[in-house]
């Protein structure tokens, strides 16, 4: 099957699924100086609940994880478990970047966790790179058609279509598929929706007709052999003829005849790419490295110049072909966090994240923010724990923003207090040296938090 057929099939099949996958379970347990991190990883060729389908990870991945954690703490049924302690920066064990931060105050602390898994955070450059590579392939296609159609009266119209309309529409296709990979994890995104969107997009632009859909689908996804391949090529040929103004009831122009036969396409493409500057450079490097090899062993021109360029341009969910990767993150906490994009499981005392780690454009991301009240200190000052949860988070962040002089003034005020009826009056009267009775924006924040907490009891 020619690369033209493969490329067309790749654009038409938007949900390829691999036959195996890598599974990661990451368990995080907060400690006073950081976090204990336990990563369990394995490969599965079927349902992860079936032990017979579990396989050990590759040696290269084991070496990578051993460099971060040291030897695996346990190996059970093909599952490798690695453990370590980290204070601030999370290791790139799965791929990405993460932080563990802690903000302290005498009344309690705030801890924050965030981590990016896989992907790239330079989204502008990623989309730009895809469009640059698409432009390169379109330019090569235009040059190939010019080589094949030289002297044909339809040549200019074909080049104009490829250069303007097709280039524009394929750039929209890049964005459509790119955006779908970003929202693919949303429950309302629907894996089917991107397919219907693209069907309508290309029907509206007269690339195909609804009456042809069953045959298109059969040719792309059924892989029924040469007859279907031949029909697919002829459908592409007819679409191109229609795009340059040839009605469907008229013969295909002679200059496009080569598109109707897979072997002729391969011969034509190989002859064209062999005389390009890109291939000459590839060939010269090969000849220098293999001076004694026969000419028949030289790299194929089409494969060398084009290769699998369509894969990174039109990213398809489920790629690469070795299957997707799955990640479950478990963060152990005594109480529900103040903020998170995970799911709180009160019974397990965990925040849970479940991610599919395709190499899509938007990295998978986990974050959580929670507070740890200093119950003993608060009981000494207020008679009970006044600040916890969200109010404590706001209090600690306010406290951390104070300069040293204001921190000393506030600490002295808090430490001089005792629980009792006079606490409210003292809070209402307190002002920092730079504040007056009518304007106290700095002390208003803790005063409001503490008074509201007192009123809530």
Image: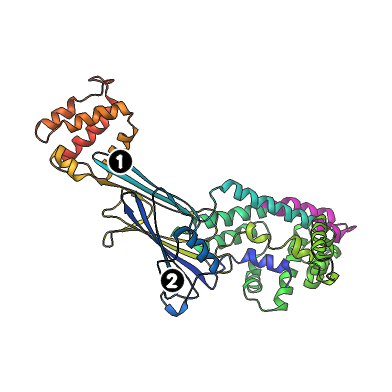
In the rendering, at what x and y percent does residue 26 appear? 40, 61
Q: Is residue 160 magenta?
A: yes
Prevailing secondary structure class for the magenta stretch in the rendered image: helix
In the rendering, at what x and y percent does residue 325 appear? 50, 65
Q: Of marks 2 and 1, which one's residue comes earlier in the chain?
A: 2
Q: Secondary structure at mark 1?
A: strand
The answer to whether 14 appears left or right of 233 in the picture is left
- Is 197 located above or below residue 114 in the figure? below
Q: Callout 2: 10 Å neighbours few (<14), some, many (20+)?
A: many
In the rendering, at what x and y percent does residue 240 appear? 75, 61
> Are circles 2 and 1 on residues that touch, CB within 8 Å?
no
The answer to whether 123 appears left or right of 112 in the picture is right
Residue toward you, 225 or 86:
86
Q: What is the basis of the colouring in this image?
A: rainbow
Place residue 143 in its image quadrant: bottom right
Q: Which residues are magenta?
A: 143-168
In the rendering, at what x and y percent does residue 268 appear? 83, 66
> Quick one: quadrant of the N terminus?
bottom right
- Is 232 located above or below residue 349 in the figure? below
Numbered badge on residue 355: none
- Is 6 located above or below residue 349 in the figure? below
The answer to whether 36 appears left or right of 122 in the picture is left
Query: Disc 1 marks which residue?
Result: 104
Q: Callout 1: 10 Å neighbours few (<14), some, many (20+)?
A: some
Residue 54 appearing in the image = yes
Q: Is residue 31 magenta?
A: no
* Residue drawn at (77%, 72%) of the image: 262
> Quick one: quadrant of the C terminus?
top left
Residue ranking furthest to the right:
151
Query: Disc 2 marks which residue?
Result: 79
Residue 244 appearing in the image = no
């Amino acid at each position: 099957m020619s690369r033209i057929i493969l490329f067309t099939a790749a654009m038409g099949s938007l949900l390829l699924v691999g036959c195996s996958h890598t599974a990661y379970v990451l368990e995080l347990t907060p400690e006073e100086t950081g976090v204990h991190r336990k990563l369990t990883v394995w490969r599965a060729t079927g349902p992860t609940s079936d032990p017979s389908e579990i396989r050990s990870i590759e040696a290269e991945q084991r070496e990578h994880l051993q460099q971060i954690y040291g030897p695996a703490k346990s190996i059970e049924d093909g599952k490798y478990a690695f453990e370590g302690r980290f204070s601030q920066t999370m290791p790139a064990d799965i791929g990405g970047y993460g932080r563990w931060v802690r903000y302290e105050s005498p009344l309690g602390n705030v801890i924050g966790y965030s981590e990016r898994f896989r992907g790239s955070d330079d989204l502008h450059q990623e989309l730009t790179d895809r469009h640059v590579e698409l432009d390169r392939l379109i330019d090569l296609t235009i040059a190939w058609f010019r080589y094949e159609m030289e002297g044909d009266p339809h040549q200019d119209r074909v080049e104009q279509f490829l250069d303007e309309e097709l280039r524009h529409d394929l750039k929209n296709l890049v964005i459509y598929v790119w955006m779908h990979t970003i929202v693919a994890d949303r429950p309302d995104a629907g894996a089917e929706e991107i397919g219907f969107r693209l069907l309508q997009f290309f029907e509206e632009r007269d690339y195909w007709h609804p009456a042809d859909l069953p045959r298109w689908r059969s040719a792309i996804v059924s892989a029924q052999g040469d007859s279907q391949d031949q029909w697919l090529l002829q459908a592409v040929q007819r679409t191109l003829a229609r795009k340059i103004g040839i009605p469907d009831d008229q013969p295909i122009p002679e200059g496009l005849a080569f598109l109707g036969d897979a072997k002729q396409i391969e011969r034509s493409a190989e002859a064209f790419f062999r005389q390009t500057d890109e291939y000459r450079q590839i060939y010269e490097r090969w000849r220098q490295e293999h001076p004694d090899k026969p000419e028949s062993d030289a790299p194929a021109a089409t494969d060398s110049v084009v290769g699998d360029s369509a894969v990174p341009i039109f990213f398809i969910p489920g790629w690469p072909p070795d299957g997707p990767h799955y990640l479950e993150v478990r963060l152990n906490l005594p109480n529900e966090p103040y903020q998170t994009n995970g799911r709180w499981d009160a019974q397990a005392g965990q925040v849970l994240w479940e991610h599919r780690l395709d190499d899509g454009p938007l990295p998978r991301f986990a974050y959580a923010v929670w507070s740890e009240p200093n119950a003993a200190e608060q009981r000494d000052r207020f008679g009970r724990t006044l600040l916890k949860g969200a109010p404590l988070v706001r209090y600690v962040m306010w406290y951390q923003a104070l300069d040293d002089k204001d921190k000393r003034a506030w600490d002295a005020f808090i430490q001089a207090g005792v629980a009792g009826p006079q606490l409210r009056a003292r809070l209402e009267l307190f002002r920092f040296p730079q504040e007056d009775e009518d304007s106290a924006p700095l002390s208003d924040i803790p005063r409001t938090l503490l008074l509201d907490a007192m009123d809530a009891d």
